[in-house]
Structure formats: C-alpha cells, structure tokens
Image (cartoon, rainbow, N blue to C red):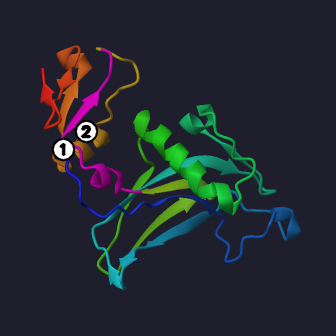
Amino acid sequence: MRFGKKIWTFVLICVLLCASVFPASASDTQLIDTERICDLTIRYFYTDLPVAGAQFSVYRIGDISEDGTHSLIGHFAEYPVDTSHLTEGVLSKTAELLYSYALWDQVEPDAVMTIREDGTAVEQLPVGLYLVAGQKFLDAVTPDHGVISVGEGNTHSHPVPSILERYEKSGITIYRTDKEGSIVFKSTGGEPIKQ
C-alpha cells in the first residue's frame, strides 16, 4: 500500500427537511411535508480554497414521517444499527458504520455530487434521511490491490459497476474470486506477491 497522503474523513448523516431551523421534533412547530423536494448543498473548501472535482456519494438511508420520526429503508434497514437516538455524540460513528456497511455490500449511491469551481455542489432530493460520504476512503488507504469475494453467477449483481469504476480510477488492480477462484497474497515484509 502507498501511504503519506493527508486523510480527510467526511461521512455524515443528513436530515433533509427543507427547513432553515431543525426543531427537536416536528410536533414542536408543524408537520413535515414529506412530498417536498429539497436542495442538498455541500460546500467543500480547504484553507479557503474550493476543492473542485471532489465527489460525495449520497445514499437515501431513511424515510421521515410527518411527525419527524424516521425509519431506515432498503439495505440500511437490514443493518444492526440503532438510529433511534442520533445525538451529536453518536452521529459521526453511526454514519461511519452505515457507510462501511454500504461499501461492504457495494450499495449504489442514490446520487454522486461533484464539487464545482465555486466550492459547492447542489442536488435536489426528496425529504428523507441521507448518508453523505466523501470519496476520500480510497485516497486515505491507497491500496494497490483489491480482492472482491463474489460467487460465480451471484444473484446480487456484485460487483456493482460503479464500484469497479471507482477502483479503476484509483489505479487499484482488482482480483475477483468469481473469475480467478481462491486468491492468496504472500509477503515477507515488502510488497505483497499474488500467488
């Protein structure tokens, strides 16, 4: 693996309600319009300079009811993650855990947002609970090799094409068990050798 790059982790859970102020619960003020389309805006700067071209994956992980309660949906409903008390202290860890599950299961993002020259990206999305993840994970670990463990003729359509494309863009050599069978790497402390 190659190391030495500065690691910027950006994974968060975003509650998209289209409101300028988020009340403790919707019943404190009014019901939420669950049919409304909202703008999710990401601003991404490093030392006051826009980071144009940076990408963020956006996953819709939950629905929000009119009274402000939420429930996880799709793949995310299957994960053993408690989101009933999303306080500031656990929000980041919960987001990182959900993102690790999404990466492992190769869940396709609902949107990929690319930062423009002005440092912003905007996407119109329906009211819901979203996971927003920066594409810095692969940059942080910068692997040379990747192994995708998948059975031949699997019914889950793995590996997902966008994941393969992301790995290719990162210069990662991919080995697949459905095409190559068992994959073994050996190392004596230097670069790993595929056998």
How busy is the neighbourhood of tag 2: few (under 14 within 10 Å), some, or many (20 plus)? Answer: some
Query: Left or right: where does residue 126 sit relative to residue 68?
Result: left
Quadrant of the image containing the C terminus: top left
Q: Look at the numbered discs 2 and 1 and tell me whether their residues touch, using CB distance below 8 Å.
A: yes
> Image quadrant of residue 178?
top left
Query: Left or right: where does residue 129 sit relative to residue 186?
Result: right
Cα gap from disc 2 to disc 1, whole angstroms = 6 Å
The residue at the point 18 percent across, 42 percent down is: 144
Residue in front for this viewpoint, 132 or 73:
132
Instruction: Say what secondary structure mark 1 lies in.
Output: helix
Query: Left or right: where does residue 167 sit relative to residue 104?
Result: left
> Image quadrant of residue 10?
bottom left
Residue in front for this viewpoint, 148 or 144:
144
Q: Which mark is residue 168?
A: 1
Q: Which mark is residue 164?
A: 2
Taking the magenta stretch, the answer to whether it contains residue 30 is no
Q: Position of residue 90 (x, y in %)?
A: 65, 54
Q: How many marks?
A: 2
Q: Position of residue 146 (x, y in %)?
A: 24, 35
The amino acid sitting under disc 2 is: Leu
Image: magenta residue range: 134-151
The amino acid sitting under disc 1 is: Glu
Residue in front for this viewpoint, 21 or 136:
136
Q: Position of residue 131 (x, y in %)?
A: 53, 53
Q: Is residue 98 above or below residue 187?
A: below
Q: Is residue 84 above or below residue 180?
A: below
Q: Which mark is residue 139?
A: none
How busy is the neighbourhood of tag 1: few (under 14 within 10 Å), some, or many (20 plus)? Answer: few
Query: Left or right: where does residue 140 sit relative to residue 165?
Result: right
Residue furthest to the bottom in view is: 48
